[in-house]
Amino acid sequence: MSTLPPNFAQAVNTILSAMELVEGQLTRREARLLVLLAAAPTCQGEVLEIGTFKGRSTIVLAKAAVLAGQRRVVAVDPLTSPAVTDPSLHGQSSAWTDLQANLQRAGVEQVVEFHQSR
Protein backbone atom coordinates (compact mmCIF):
# COMPACT_ATOMS: atom_id res chain seq x y z
CA MET A 1 0.00 0.00 0.00
CA SER A 2 1.30 3.45 -0.90
CA THR A 3 1.81 6.21 1.59
CA LEU A 4 1.26 9.87 0.90
CA PRO A 5 4.33 11.90 0.03
CA PRO A 6 5.74 14.35 2.60
CA ASN A 7 4.04 17.77 2.65
CA PHE A 8 1.08 16.30 0.76
CA ALA A 9 -1.45 18.97 1.81
CA GLN A 10 0.87 21.76 0.69
CA ALA A 11 1.54 19.94 -2.60
CA VAL A 12 -2.20 19.61 -3.25
CA ASN A 13 -2.66 23.36 -2.85
CA THR A 14 0.24 24.06 -5.22
CA ILE A 15 -1.19 21.67 -7.81
CA LEU A 16 -4.66 23.20 -7.54
CA SER A 17 -3.18 26.68 -8.03
CA ALA A 18 -1.48 25.52 -11.24
CA MET A 19 -4.75 23.92 -12.40
CA GLU A 20 -6.71 27.15 -11.91
CA LEU A 21 -4.65 28.82 -14.67
CA VAL A 22 -6.03 26.42 -17.29
CA GLU A 23 -9.44 26.40 -18.97
CA GLY A 24 -11.42 23.21 -18.44
CA GLN A 25 -14.25 21.44 -16.64
CA LEU A 26 -12.35 19.75 -13.79
CA THR A 27 -13.52 20.98 -10.37
CA ARG A 28 -11.26 21.46 -7.35
CA ARG A 29 -12.97 18.53 -5.64
CA GLU A 30 -12.40 16.23 -8.62
CA ALA A 31 -8.80 17.45 -8.86
CA ARG A 32 -8.16 16.56 -5.21
CA LEU A 33 -9.25 12.99 -5.94
CA LEU A 34 -6.99 12.80 -9.00
CA VAL A 35 -4.06 14.08 -6.94
CA LEU A 36 -4.67 11.41 -4.32
CA LEU A 37 -4.95 8.63 -6.90
CA ALA A 38 -1.84 9.67 -8.83
CA ALA A 39 0.30 10.55 -5.80
CA ALA A 40 -0.42 7.33 -3.89
CA PRO A 41 -0.91 4.63 -6.54
CA THR A 42 -2.02 1.19 -5.43
CA CYS A 43 -0.29 -0.61 -8.31
CA GLN A 44 2.67 -0.31 -10.67
CA GLY A 45 2.35 1.44 -14.01
CA GLU A 46 1.93 4.78 -15.67
CA VAL A 47 -1.00 7.14 -15.51
CA LEU A 48 -3.10 7.21 -18.69
CA GLU A 49 -5.45 10.11 -19.35
CA ILE A 50 -7.98 9.86 -22.16
CA GLY A 51 -9.33 13.30 -22.98
CA THR A 52 -6.91 16.17 -22.45
CA PHE A 53 -8.47 19.31 -24.01
CA LYS A 54 -6.17 22.14 -22.85
CA GLY A 55 -4.42 20.20 -20.09
CA ARG A 56 -6.22 21.11 -16.87
CA SER A 57 -6.48 17.54 -15.55
CA THR A 58 -3.27 16.53 -17.32
CA ILE A 59 -1.33 19.04 -15.24
CA VAL A 60 -2.96 17.76 -12.05
CA LEU A 61 -2.10 14.15 -12.89
CA ALA A 62 1.46 14.96 -13.98
CA LYS A 63 2.32 17.01 -10.92
CA ALA A 64 0.80 14.39 -8.61
CA ALA A 65 2.57 11.53 -10.39
CA VAL A 66 5.88 13.32 -9.90
CA LEU A 67 5.15 13.35 -6.15
CA ALA A 68 4.97 9.55 -6.34
CA GLY A 69 8.27 9.33 -8.22
CA GLN A 70 6.70 8.68 -11.61
CA ARG A 71 8.38 10.14 -14.66
CA ARG A 72 5.61 9.96 -17.21
CA VAL A 73 1.90 10.50 -17.74
CA VAL A 74 0.47 9.41 -21.07
CA ALA A 75 -2.31 11.65 -22.42
CA VAL A 76 -4.51 11.03 -25.47
CA ASP A 77 -6.95 13.38 -27.19
CA PRO A 78 -8.17 13.94 -30.77
CA LEU A 79 -8.00 17.74 -30.25
CA THR A 80 -11.00 18.28 -32.50
CA SER A 81 -13.03 21.45 -32.38
CA PRO A 82 -15.94 21.54 -32.13
CA ALA A 83 -16.22 18.10 -30.60
CA VAL A 84 -19.16 15.90 -29.68
CA THR A 85 -18.30 16.53 -26.03
CA ASP A 86 -17.70 20.27 -26.54
CA PRO A 87 -20.19 21.49 -29.19
CA SER A 88 -19.86 25.10 -27.98
CA LEU A 89 -16.35 25.37 -29.45
CA HIS A 90 -17.66 26.57 -32.81
CA GLY A 91 -14.97 28.16 -34.94
CA GLN A 92 -12.12 27.41 -32.56
CA SER A 93 -9.16 25.55 -33.92
CA SER A 94 -7.39 22.68 -32.21
CA ALA A 95 -6.43 23.10 -28.56
CA TRP A 96 -2.88 21.93 -29.36
CA THR A 97 -1.22 25.35 -29.02
CA ASP A 98 -2.97 26.06 -25.72
CA LEU A 99 -2.17 22.56 -24.44
CA GLN A 100 1.54 22.96 -25.19
CA ALA A 101 1.68 26.40 -23.56
CA ASN A 102 -0.20 25.19 -20.47
CA LEU A 103 2.03 22.14 -19.98
CA GLN A 104 5.12 24.29 -20.35
CA ARG A 105 3.87 26.98 -17.95
CA ALA A 106 3.09 24.28 -15.37
CA GLY A 107 6.54 22.75 -15.83
CA VAL A 108 5.28 19.30 -16.82
CA GLU A 109 5.99 19.25 -20.57
CA GLN A 110 8.78 16.70 -20.01
CA VAL A 111 6.52 14.48 -17.89
CA VAL A 112 3.56 14.30 -20.29
CA GLU A 113 3.77 12.05 -23.34
CA PHE A 114 0.95 13.26 -25.58
CA HIS A 115 -0.66 11.27 -28.40
CA GLN A 116 -3.21 12.80 -30.73
CA SER A 117 -5.84 10.19 -31.53
CA ARG A 118 -7.43 10.07 -34.96
Image (cartoon, grey):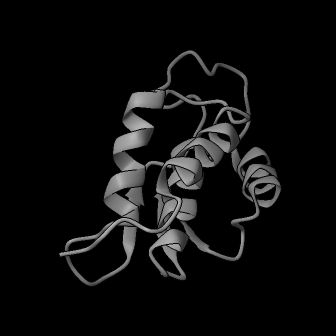
Q: Is residue 95 left or right of residue 13?
A: right
- Residue placed furthest toward the top: 88
Location of residue 38 with respect to 42 vertically, above or below = above
Location of residue 114 with respect to 51 vertically, above or below = below
Question: In this orientation, which residue lies closer to the viewer: 15 or 11?
Answer: 11
* Residue 33 lies in quadrant: top left
What x and y, as percent, mark residue 22?
A: 69, 36
Residue at 32 percent of width and 66 percent of height: 40
Q: Is residue 84 visible?
A: no
Question: In this orientation, which residue lies closer to the viewer: 21 or 4?
Answer: 4
- Residue placed furthest toward the front: 7
What x and y, as percent, mark residue 36?
A: 35, 53
Q: Is residue 63 left or right of residue 6?
A: right
* Residue 113 lies in quadrant: bottom right
Residue at 80 percent of width and 60 percent of height: 104
Q: Is residue 90 visible?
A: yes
What x and y, as percent, mark residue 118?
A: 48, 59
Residue at 48 percent of width and 56 percent of height: 8
Q: Is residue 108 left or right of residue 45?
A: right
What x and y, as percent, mark residue 89?
A: 62, 22
Q: Quadrant of the N terminus?
A: bottom left
Location of residue 91 with respect to 114 vertically, above or below = above
Residue at 73 percent of width and 28 percent of height: 92
